Amino acid sequence: VRDELNKYEYPKEQIEIVKLEPGAVSAYDDYSSQRVDMNVHGNFFQLMYFLKDMENSRMFIHVEKVSISNKKEGLDCRLGVRIFSEAS
């Protein structure tokens, strides 16, 4: 998952992936899915680029939970996403 996130076009040297916690993979006949919890930190525009890049990913990513809080040094964004992929 971290490799896929590193392909995005946001200013990587400025946004910080604080936590990346993959959950168990659920396999079905035609696809599989995996829950991933993550925390990222950056300014408003960096977070918007990050979310937009997730939306445009080649993978289907469903955002199940999002929480953004204002901190003195920027914004903290907590995400709970489910990533879907075709069964191989």
Image: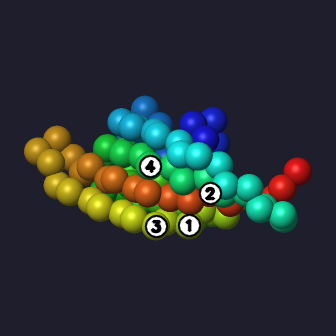
Q: Earlier in the sequence, mark 3 or mark 4?
A: 4
Q: Residue at x 74, y 56 (%)?
A: 27
- At a point 36% along the width and 36% down the height, the residue shown is 18
Of residue 70 and residue 60, the one placed in the foreground of this image is 60
Q: Amino acid at mark 1?
A: His
**Quarter of the view holding residue 80:** bottom left
Above/below status of 65 relative to 72: below
- Marks 2,1: beta carbons within 8 A: yes
Q: Is residue 56 visible?
A: yes
Please tell me how crowded label 4 is: few (under 14), some (14-19), or many (20+) other residues with Cα within 10 Å: some
**C-alpha distance separating marks 4 and 2:** 11 Å
Q: Separation of disc 3 and disc 2 at Cα?
A: 10 Å
Query: Label 2, label 1: how many angstroms apart (C-alpha)?
Result: 6 Å
Q: Secondary structure at mark 4?
A: strand
Label 1: how many Cα within 10 Å (few below 14, some 14–19, many 20+): some
Which residue in the structure is indicated by mark 1?
A: 62
Residue of label 3 = 64
Mark 2 or mark 1, which has the lower sequence index? Answer: 1
Q: Secondary structure at mark 2?
A: strand
Would you name the residue on which mark 4 appears? 37
Compare residues 25 and 44 and report the one nearer the observer. Answer: 25
Q: Does residue 54 appear in this view?
A: no
The circle drawn on residue 83 is 2
